[in-house]
Every structure is written in structure tokens, then in C-alpha cells.
Amino acid sequence: MAKGSDLDRVASVVLREMRNPILVLITVHALGIGGMVLIPGVDPDGNSVHMGFFHAFYFMTYTATTTGFGELPYAFSEAQRIWASICLYLSVVAWIYGIGSIIRLVQNPHFAQAVAQRRFAVATARITEPFVIICGFGDTGSLLTRGLSDRRIHGVVIDNNVERIKALALRDYDLKIPGLCGDAGVPKNLRDAGLERPECRAVVLLTGDDDINFKIAVMTRLMNSRAEVICRSTERIHEEQLNSLGSVVIVDPFETFARELVLALRAPTLHTLNQWLLGAKDATLERTVSYHPGTWILCGYGRMGRRLQGALQDQQVPTVVIDPNVEPSEVEQAVVGMATKANLLEAGMHHAAGLVTATDSDSTNLAILLTARSINPSAHLVVRQNHHENELAFNAASADLIMQPSLVTARRILLRLISPLIQAFLEHLEDNPELLRAEVYPSLRANLGTSRPVLFTLNTDARSAPAVIALIDGGSVLTLDALLRDPRNRDQRLGCVVLVLRRGQQRHMMPAASMALEADDELLIVATSDAERRIRTSLTDQYLLEYLATGVERSRSVLDNWLRA
Amino acid sequence: MNLEKVIFGFFVVLALTLNVAFVIGEIDDPQHHSVWILFTAIVVNLIATVLKIGDRSHIGALLLATALVADLQLIACASVWTIANQVLGVVSTEVTVGIVSLAAGALVANVVSVTMVVTDSLISGR
């Protein structure tokens, strides 16, 4: 219905606006034709003749459009010429009026908005696969959209900033990402974005306004209870409000980063794996970045500073906070003031293990970084990057860890959208360091090497893996090992590792290769991009899958099968 | 009284009356069917069509449909006449019958249209 009403609206606005110009055109033509037929002309023999309706119509057609084929069928009489000039001026005015009306209509911002809204609704309705609605297209939104498009997950964007939507249209995404300029808190816009459709799997709230985020979360719960709500939030109060709605996933960039930093201090191997899976730049499994214990200095005690201080304190890491507004009673050790060289020295930069610059100004953060490095070159330097456009400067600063809230949020949400199993897997590894050391690491190193990992999930259901279902229904056994062999040469394995196999409520972490697949399993796989493509092909190609499972390549031709039988 | 309604009613009824004026007479006698009346009937029908455009109600859509049918039949009628007259050079009895039958078809569409307008205003009671 949404499409229909939008189409109706645009079409009826056009027709209503064009009604008067068309009436004027019809009248002018009728007048001209009538006049030409009435006014007598003269034929070459000097007889008085009247033009027929057909000739009059023909004359008006080429005169009104200013084509001007001349005086047909005979040279005009003076009376006819007078009337022809009147017709010409009348029709030119009528055409200008008509064209002017169209231009005025097209330039009307409300009309343009209605057309854009309709285009958006049509583009959204064309998406037949599961998709995600992204509300807010700032730094985080655009990073997330890029990630989704790279993983072939469809997305739809709503933002109230015209410039951002224009920018979206110019991005070279692999998928077509429709964008609407409008308030995401308005239910009509959400409906046009496809919120009510069963294919809508999640709504991501990145508007930067907690009230609007909350409003969209409520709308989503009401309009589509199956869709997952993922919300970025940095305020504790707001998080409680959202939590009361139930089943809302809250991503707090500062919280996430605090957890990552603690992980880096406590379990460097797992942290490296985490970074590598997240697709962080220059993260490899070959090199583990470990942070030695000692005193950490925190510059900036805002929202991020507080989270970090709390997380470090929980790990019994001694911290010194430098901030102009910090209450010395709040933290275990504080230096009140800006992070100048003198204050850094006072905080004990000489023998500190590491330093985190967490202010909300990028230039301050970089300046502190440079000062700190000049005092103690061996200290770990962790820096907060606030704006994505400053990336080049931060790369040049070569800090040990760059914390970019928008990137952290986008990655966390992307992983969540790829599969909630990833988080479960990482948590499992945190509790079982032995599994990580003895199984996960060697397996990943052997199968993927240094290539960039692609994380994806596979569902063995009839829709996404028809060949698997056909094989299992046919009574054959398909092991994980068989599925992950190279279709070109069955003796070789593809570069991939199954991290988790979920069957119903049960989760098998690092499942054995001999495990047989069943219908409706969910697999979390990390693979090279080449391997991912090959696995996806064999899911739909039954002959290929049979070859992988049995080593015998069955003929695809009916005739051949019949001859052999 | 609403001026818009007056104009609308005027053109819808005029389309019907002009159509009747053209169709009436012996079906095969060209003398009974004036080309001027056909011309005005087409113009008035076109204007009535444009006036019906843009009404999003169900009855508005039906009215537009009947008007389009009438336009189609009348324009076909004029085209047949023009081709017979200008291209073939003779308007035979068969052609005259064809022209008037096409116009009679348009007449039915116009009757339906006027009936709907009248019924609608009676039902709405205004």
C-alpha cells in the first residue's frame, strides 16, 4: 500500500498542476482550428475556398510548435494571415505557460521530496534478501554501510541531512543502497524503508540524538517485533531506558574499547585474534602485541576516560589521571591540569607502562602523544581519534593502538550483524585460553596464513543451501571435512576454518572435521575470500557437492545416465 | 453554489449533448452529421477529460476512464473521416455508417459519465 499511495500522490500532484495549462492548450488549438476553417481562402484559380478540419489541424500543429512549414495547401489570403499570426502568439504563450508550470513543479522542494520518497520506497521494495535499516549516515553509518556492502548484506539508509544522502548516492558500493533524506523517527519514513517487511532483520540507530534513537526503537518494537534493534549509545541513563524495551543491543564505543584495552593487557593473543577477525589494519596472527603491566596514564577524564579508568581499576592496573576538571578524590591518583610536559612528568611518564590520550580533541590527543613519546619512547601509546577525516595524521603518528569511536562502533555492529556467534566464540576463548593456543591459532595459521580473513555464516536450510539439503535427504553423509575441500582438487583443503557450529541451542566451538552436517545448522566460518566464493558455489551445486562428499563425479547429462544404466 | 462544480457539470453535460447532436439523424446520410459538431464535441470531450484528471477518489477514477473511452472513440471517428476524405478521396455510405457508429459508442460512454455524476451528487445529497 505504501508504494501505491506514494505513486498516487506524485501522479495526482503532476496532473492537478498540469490541468490548467492543458486546458489552455486545448482551447487555443480549438480556437485556431475553428478560425482557420471559418476564414475563407483563395485557390490558384481565384475561387473562394474554406480550409478543411484536417488541414486546419495540420496547420495548427506545426504553427503551435513553431515548426512552420508555410502556407498550405494554397497561399493564404490576408484574412487568413491575420488569424495565423494571432494563433501563433496565442499558442506560444500557451506552450510557455505549460512548460513554465512543469518547471515550477519540478523546482518545488515538496514535490522533489515526494518524488525522492517514492523512488526510495520503490528501491527498497526491490530488495528481496534480508536487509538492515541504518538510521544516521555519519562516520559510523558510512563505515558500517561500506562493511555491509562488502559482505553482500543489503542496507537502507535514512538520514535527515541532505548533504549526507547526496554523498551516499555518490559512493561506489557493490550493492545498491537506497537513501532517504528525512526524519527516521517518523513512522511513515520507517515504513517506506521496509520496516514492516519480514526481510528486515535489523534496525541500526546511529542518529546521534538519544531521543530520536529511543523513538525509533519504540516504533521498531511496535511495527516489526522480529527485527533486531542495535543502538549506539554513550550515556548510561539512556541505555537503561532502552533496555526497558527488551532485546535491544546497545553498542557503547567507549565500553567496547575499554574492554578491548583490558583484553590487550590481560590476554594479548586473544586480543590479536580479535583485531585480526575484525579486519583491523596491520593485524596479523604472526605478531602478538602484548602490553606490559605497570602504571598507565590517562589524559582526559570525560566519558571515555571514566570507562577506561573503571576498566583498568577492575584489573588492578594502577592509573594516573590527568585532566583539568578531575576531582582528586574520585580516582586513586590524579594530576589536575592540562596534559603538558610538566604535568606528564609529574604523573610519572618516565616509568609509565603506557599512556592513553582520551580527550575529545584530535589535535590535543596528537600533541600529548608527541610529548609523551619524547619523554618515554618505550611506553605504549594509545590514542583516541575522534574524526574519521584525520586518519592520515593518526596513521603517521604510529601509535600502538588507535581508538576511533566510529570505527569501533561500526565494527562491533557489523560483527553482530554477520553473526551473534562471533561474540560467543570470543567469550568462549576468553574462558579457555588452552583451546586458543593449542587449536585455534595453529589451525588459523595453517589454513589462512597471512591472507585477509572473511567472516561469514552459512545456514544449511533449503533456501541458502539447497544442494546440502538434497544430499542429506538422499541419505548421504556430508562431513564438514568434505564441504571444505577444494572443488578443483578434492585432495586439497580450502583455506578456511569453521569456528562455531550451532545446532539448535547447542554450540560446538571448533567442531571436529569428521562432524556430519544436518539440516538447519548454522556455521561460522573464517576463510580467504577465494575460499568463501568456492564454498558458496558448492552449496547450490549438487553435482559438485556429491563429488566433494564421495569423490565420484556423477554425470550431469540425462542421456549419459540413461546409457550407463 | 460552487463555481468549480458548475464548470465541471457544464462540460460533462455539454460533451453528452454535442455527442447526441452529432449522432442524431439517418445513420448513412452524411448530410445529417455536421463536421463542426464533431469538432466541438471532440474539443469539449477533451476539456471534460482534463477536468476529471487528478481526482483520487474511486468515482473520480471511473469518470476519467469513461472520458478516455469517449475521447478514444471520437478521435477514431474523426481519423476515419479524415482518412476517407483526404487519402481515399471519397466518403462512401459504409464509411459514414462507421463514423456515426463510433460516435454512438462515445455517446454511451458519455451517458455513463453523466449518470455517474448525477448519481454521485444525489447520493452525497448536496
Image (spheres, rainbow, N blue to C red):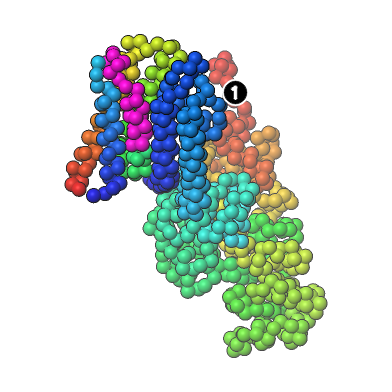
Eyeballing the image, is A93 above or below A332?
A: above
Report the residue marked by disc 1: A555
In the rendered structure, the answer to whether residue A155 lies left or right of residue A50 reads right
Q: Does the segment drawn in magenta span residue A489? A: no
When asked about the image quadrant of residue B92, the answer is top left
Judged by its main secondary structure, the magenta piece is: helix
Can residue A29 be seen from the camera position used here?
yes
Q: Is residue A132 above or below residue A362?
A: above
On screen, residue B62 above or below A189:
above
- Helix, strand or loop status at disc 1: loop
Residue type at mark 1 is: Ser
User: Depth check: A25 or B111 in front?
Assistant: A25
In terms of depth relative to the viewer, which is nearer, B74 or A248? B74
Which residue in the rendered view is the most extreme toward the front? A46
User: Residue A326's spot in the image, x, y percent?
Assistant: 62, 85
| Quadrant in the picture for residue A458 | top right
Q: What's drawn in magenta, residue-wise? A: B27-49
Quarter holding the C terminus of chain A? Answer: top right
Near mark 1 (Cα within 10 A), the count class, few <14, some 14-19 or many ≥20, is: few
Q: Which residue lies at the image location 41% right of the left edge and 65% below the top edge?
A: A245
Letter of the chain that mark 1 sits on in the rendering: A
Please name whichever residue, A311 or B117, is drawn nearer the observer in this view of the structure.
B117
In this picture, is A57 found above or below A527? above
Q: Position of residue A236 (x, y in %)?
A: 50, 73
Q: Position of residue A374 (x, y in %)?
A: 81, 77
Look at the image and tell me whether residue A470 can be seen. no
